[in-house]
Image (cartoon, rainbow, N blue to C red):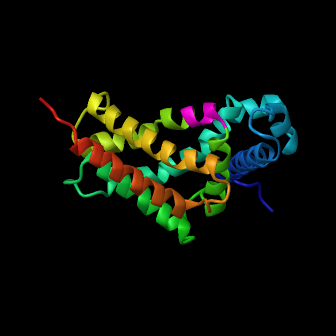
Amino acid sequence: MGKPSAATVVGLRERKKAQTRRMMIDAAVDLCLAQGYENTTVEQIAGAVEISPRTFSRYFPSKEAVFIAVIDDLAEEITAELEGQPPDLGPMESLRAAHVSVLTRVAERRPVAGLTAERIVLILQIVSSCDDLRHAAMEYRSPAAMAALAEHMGVAPDDKRLELAVALFSTTIVRACTDVAASDPDVPLGPTFVTERLERALSDLAQFTAELRLV
């Protein structure tokens, strides 16, 4: 039997890295649910998947980054949806439509890379329990999604209107979901919950905006 090709070796290595990365995310989620975000350490996460803290740092620069990685998975799908939105939609409506489309696919258990209804439930529970993670989620920006939305809006990537739209949307969805998740443990969390809370919060935001009296 001949030696595997360089491409095969690289492919196997990348799959192994992706598997390790996924195991680290799963371990972090499990540990945080069991003992809380603040009580979970990088050393514990690394130990759960039998790697060293130094190896952990090659994948994630911090504990917080492990949870942001899950948002990365969502952002990749959102970016693809943004690229297909009708050109006459405004930025907020485009973001709403893209998120609802992805969340609907997850709820219906159609293929969405790295995302399941169960994973969304876990992340909601953890993010809602920690102010630092809530803030990180609101401040999160996917370069690819920002570029796609900028192109959709016909503005430069550093346009203030682009940042305003994303900041409003990010704050709205995080506040609408995590505050409820933290205050009512009996609420059935998941992609459908996120969609319903997002729609309700955006409706309130639209009403507030309509009531502005601009001089």
Quadrant of the frame with the N terminus: bottom right
Residue 165 picture location, percent across and down: 32, 38
Residue 57 is left or right of residue 92, and the answer is right
Identified at 36% across, 57% down, the residue is 97
Is residue 132 within the magenta segment?
yes
Choose between 61 and 208: the one closer to the eye.
Answer: 208
Residue 116, by quadrant, is bottom right
Any part of residue 141 in sight: yes
Extreme-left residue of the structure: 215
Quadrant of the frame with the C terminus: top left
Identified at 21% across, 37% down, the residue is 212
Instruction: Look at the image and give the residue range highlighted in magenta.
Output: 130-135
Is residue 169 within the magenta segment?
no
SS majority, magenta: helix
Q: Is residue 66 above or below residue 198?
A: above
Residue 73 picture location, percent across and down: 56, 50
Residue 80 picture location, percent across and down: 41, 54
Identified at 56% across, 44% down, the residue is 179
Any part of residue 159 in sight: no
| Number of marks drawn | 0
Residue 171, by quadrant, is top left
